[in-house]
Image (tube, rainbow, N blue to C red):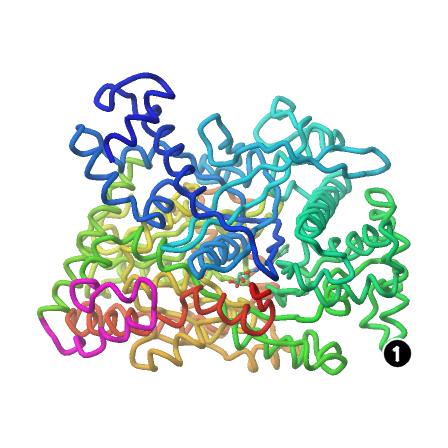
Amino acid sequence: MAEQIQKRLEQLCGKPLRQAADGELYAALLRLTEERAGERRREAQGRKLYYLSAEFLVGKLLSNNLINLGLYDAVRDCLANAGKSLADLEELEPEPSLGNGGLGRLAACFLDSLAALDLPGDGIGLLYHCGLFRQRLENNCQREYPDRWLSESCWARPTDIAYPVELGGRVFQARLYRLAVTGYEGRTNCLDLFDLDTVDESILQDGISMDKTRIDRNLTLFLYPDDSDRAGRLLRLCQQYLLASAGAQLILAECEARGCTLRDLDRYAAIQINDTHPSMVIPELIRLLGQRGIPFQEAAEIVTRTCAYTNHTILAEALETWPMADLEQTAPQLAPIIRQLDGLARARTADASLAVIDGEDRVHMAHMDIHFTHSTNGVAALHTEILKTSELAGFYRLYPQRFNNKTNGITFRRWLLACNPRLAAEIERLIGPGFKKDAGELEKLLPLAEDAAALRRLGRIKAENKQALAEWLFRRQGVLTDPGAMFSIQSKRLHQYKRQQLNLLFLIHQYLELLAGHGTPVKQVYLFGAKAAPAYTLAKDIIHALAAFARVLEETPEARRWMQVVFVENYNVTAAEKMIPACDLSEQISLAGKEASGTGNMKFMLNGALTLGTMDGANVEIAERVGPENIYIFGQSAAQVLKRYASKSYCPREWYEADPNIRRAVDFLTGPEMLRHGQAESLFRLRDDLTGKDWFQTLPDFNAYLVRKRQAIADYAARPLDWQRRCLINIAKAGFFSSDRTIAEYDRDIWHLGGA
Ligand code: 26V
């Protein structure tokens, strides 16, 4: 190994290993990894998958690729012999922030599993220069900064492939960049990301603001530019068309090069549309097939056979619709095709609510997807049921055979082997290495639930992981945490439906109880990680309240001994990899029926945390697998929530007035302690929302949450070995949530990859 690294170092900087700087070593390892990955590329035979997504939240890649290529141990040892540390090099690597959260991370897990399962499948997306913003807290408020990650030594390599894309009548060249996707003991696939050569980071003004109209210079600067004004919305639409058009051209070019006549496109390609952001690929493919002489009707049939759509949300406000006028401005060439598609759809059903273009001339992207793909899937059993019975019921009646469920999964390589090497090694010692390829083998751990020594070792590993997290937190943001405490974590995007505010109300309640002399049996550290969309005011208010409350706690010695709140800044994949292995209690407390699946819930479970959660998304399937005694479930069911919405009877003020605990906690938000650290405008806005609107029914679930959480804390404190026993059962039952299983199901039911 030393020789191999040395060879690349010589090409790069001519230095021997011992004298090379960390940056030079990193570049050498990157090159070595890419070359090794290249040896595992294989031409697709038969049908190949193209996974179209606006987001790929891949995380850092060096360790991941070394593990997948089987080089990790050798490289680590070789560096150690030369007095270097692989961990230091990992710190050096910037994380590409090409996603918001679950949706983008899922896409990355899927690429990993495709390659591991030796399936031909590439990702197609956009190369955002700054990705999502970098978050800092200033005066307890979120501030956004550009997060530049591109550099000479980064995984995205320019190619000489470029396609013309016409935006608003001007032609731009979309250049293809490629990243290698390595599969664990598998093949190498590609992540293909498009960019414009003309994009220029120097137009960035203060923070993340910029001239939104200069699309030649700004088009791929950010993932999800602020869309609170029209210029921002048009910019986002242009991004979507760039992805759809460049992606479609790449797919057709590759298929034609392999002998496809285009009439048989579905024998060469399966296209998965990840949420509605890439939906314009449907009319764009029809347009391109039309240019090659295939008439509209036939082209629509070819595209329907080739494409499939995944829905990731039931929140009405998140289902994209675009004014036809905006489409005419950005991609006028698609407008007549979309109108024709609307005509076809209307000929299939008299129900106008299922139309592609509604009465206000807005295009419903999800409707276009369902009519013109052969498969629509939800991402967890409950989610798919809700789609079929309520949100998309009309479509389900029209196309019952098109609907199917694919419960999400996560790659165990990153979310166990790489992020929690202590636990992975212990599992391997106990049940052998088979679980790395076949996650179902984790069930072999079950008999050890009665083995006290094994459970104590599990407890020690968690303690070591907490120690490591505490050190990392201190290095990163100067916060001291007590690794002897119970660690509860809620880390995910900030959204009202995820109800970080419910957690906050509990914390305030417990704080006030402590001051009133009612103790708690064990010290607790509450970690939050969450970014709020820059224009989402209430989400920012919740971050502000959490951060201000953390300050209040710090200055109250009676409470500080028992509880601490830490807001981890700039939560991203790297932070998740440090936090998840150190968690005791995983908070998955969304309003039932709102979280399509969640995937953090699976990561925490796999790393031996117990879940405190509602019967929402994949929590339902976790509960089913581990049994009610190994999970803390609370709150209204999705059906009860729907009923409350339907009756229009929910009045948060009544709950606030009737329950002294709720009133006390809510009032505290705007009391003198909070106002010392927080801004009145923001805190009052949050309080007024909770008492006047509370659209996500925080108050009705408050008491149930309080009771279950106290139970969890009491159990943790009173019976530590029993807690570890239940953690072990969670780990043993996590196999189902491997993305290898999810991908195998997609392939079996939708893609049918490979073959001749
Ligand atoms: C988007 C938006 C946009 C603006 C208004 C509010 C809002 C709320 C939610 C969303 C989510 C868009 C789609 C998405 O990211 N879905 C997530 O997909 C994950 C992978 O399937 C899944 O685990 C999460 O439950 C789901 O929220």
732 or 471: nearer the viewer: 732
Question: Which quarter of the figure has residue 429?
Answer: bottom left
Specify whether residue 540 is in view: no
Q: Residue at x 49, y 27 (%)?
A: 151
User: Between residues 158 and 311, which one lies in front from this camera angle?
Assistant: 158
Task: Please state the horizontal and vertical placement of residue 228, each as a whole percent of the image.
Answer: 70, 44
Secondary structure under tag 1 reads: loop
Q: Find disc 1 in the rendering and name its residue.
A: 350
Residue located at (34% from left, 82% from top): 628
Which portion, as a residue range, is magenta?
427-452
Residue 381 % position (x, y): 53, 77
Is residue 588 shown in magenta? no
Q: Residue at x 21, y 68 (%)?
A: 716
- x and y, in percent, of residue 148 in the image: 51, 31
**399 sits left or right of 85 in the view:** right
In the picture, which quadrant includes the C terminus? bottom right
Q: Nearer the viewer, residue 154 or 11?
A: 11
Ligand 1's quadrant is bottom right
Callout count: 1
| The quadrant where residue 664 appears | bottom left
Task: Look at label 1 and name its amino acid.
Answer: Ala
Q: Is residue 260 visible?
A: yes
